[in-house]
Image (cartoon, grey):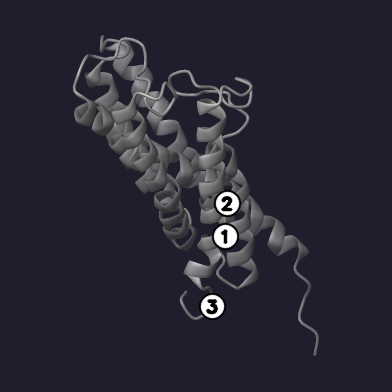
């Protein structure tokens, strides 16, 4: 792959854009801008400004660039099917755990999500390993700055979604809370999200690139 696609150049612009969005969101929450755009509540769900929305865009972009460079998946079905399977594993495991009596908002349920996010990401990775590797690297480039922001936000009690724990979260010190709501989910659940969703859209891009590519002329 190295002689066809420069991975660093492929990732650097998306990583810079993602960092900009992270800093923009932090600024919006600190300055109390529109909650619809910058939701400061725990989890920050539904905010229109956030890096989660970038994953399908860059997943498609990575898939298109790889396919255009000749780095196509072994099969278009598996390239999309494995990410879909990996995406189903996590919510299915969470549902099964609650049916079996694991309490909501508990560390035990959180552990289930962490474990199955890793398993789901591995499954999704198998669909198109070349794209999977790029998505993991992009995920790390996107999430490590968030981990740093969360560390500073928790220490400073900024009142943003970066430092507010979810409802029912047990009391713990700032470093332990940073590890629990910052480091662990950012490096597991959010990497799973990136590999799964990015893998689906990357597979779709490869399929589209295959249909639109013109045959070589003599």
For the residues carrying marks 1 and 3, which lies nearer the camera in this image? 1
Of residues 197 and 151, which is closer to you in this image?
Answer: 151
Identify residue for label 1: 13
Identify residue for label 3: 4
Q: Are marks 2 and 1 in contact (CB under 8 Å)?
A: yes
Q: CA distance from mark 3 to mark 2?
A: 24 Å
Q: Residue at x 49, y 59 (%)?
A: 131
For the residues carrying marks 3 and 2, which lies nearer the camera in this image? 2
- Badge 3 element: loop
Q: Residue at x 53, y 55 (%)?
A: 16
Q: Residue at x 77, y 63 (%)?
A: 212
**Is residue 5 left or right of 60 when viewed as pictured?**
left
Residue 143 point in image, percent of width and height: 41, 44
Q: Residues within 10 Å of mark 2 (few under 14, many from 20)?
A: few
Q: Residues within 10 Å of mark 3 (few under 14, many from 20)?
A: few
- Quadrant (top left, top right, bottom left, bottom right) of the C terminus: bottom right
Q: Is residue 115 above or below residue 91?
A: below
Q: CA distance from mark 1 to mark 3?
A: 18 Å
Of residues 9 and 192, which is closer to you in this image?
Answer: 9
Residue 29 point in image, percent of width and height: 53, 26
Of residues 214 and 23, which is closer to you in this image?
Answer: 23
Identify residue for label 2: 17
């Amino acid at each position: 792959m190295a002689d066809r696609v420069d991975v660093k150049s492929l990732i650097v612009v998306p990583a810079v854009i993602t960092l900009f969005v992270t800093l923009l969101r932090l600024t919006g929450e600190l300055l109390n801008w529109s909650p619809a755009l910058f939701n400061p509540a725990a989890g920050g769900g539904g905010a229109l400004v956030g890096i989660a929305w970038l994953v399908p865009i860059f997943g498609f972009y990575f898939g298109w660039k790889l396919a255009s460079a000749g780095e196509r998946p072994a099969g278009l079905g598996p390239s999309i099917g494995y990410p879909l399977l990996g995406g189903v594993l996590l919510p299915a495991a969470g549902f099964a755990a609650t049916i079996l009596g694991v309490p909501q908002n508990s560390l035990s349920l959180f552990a289930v999500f962490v474990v199955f996010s890793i398993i789901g990401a591995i499954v999704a990775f198998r669909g198109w390993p070349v794209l999977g590797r790029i998505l993991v690297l992009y995920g790390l480039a996107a999430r490590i700055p968030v981990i740093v922001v969360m560390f500073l936000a928790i220490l400073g009690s900024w009142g943003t979604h970066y430092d507010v724990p979810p409802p029912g979260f047990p009391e713990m010190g700032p470093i332990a809370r940073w590890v629990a709501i910052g480091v662990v989910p950012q490096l597991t659940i959010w990497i799973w999200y990136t590999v799964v969703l990015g893998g689906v859209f990357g597979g779709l891009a490869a399929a589209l690139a295959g249909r639109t590519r013109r045959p070589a002329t003599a």
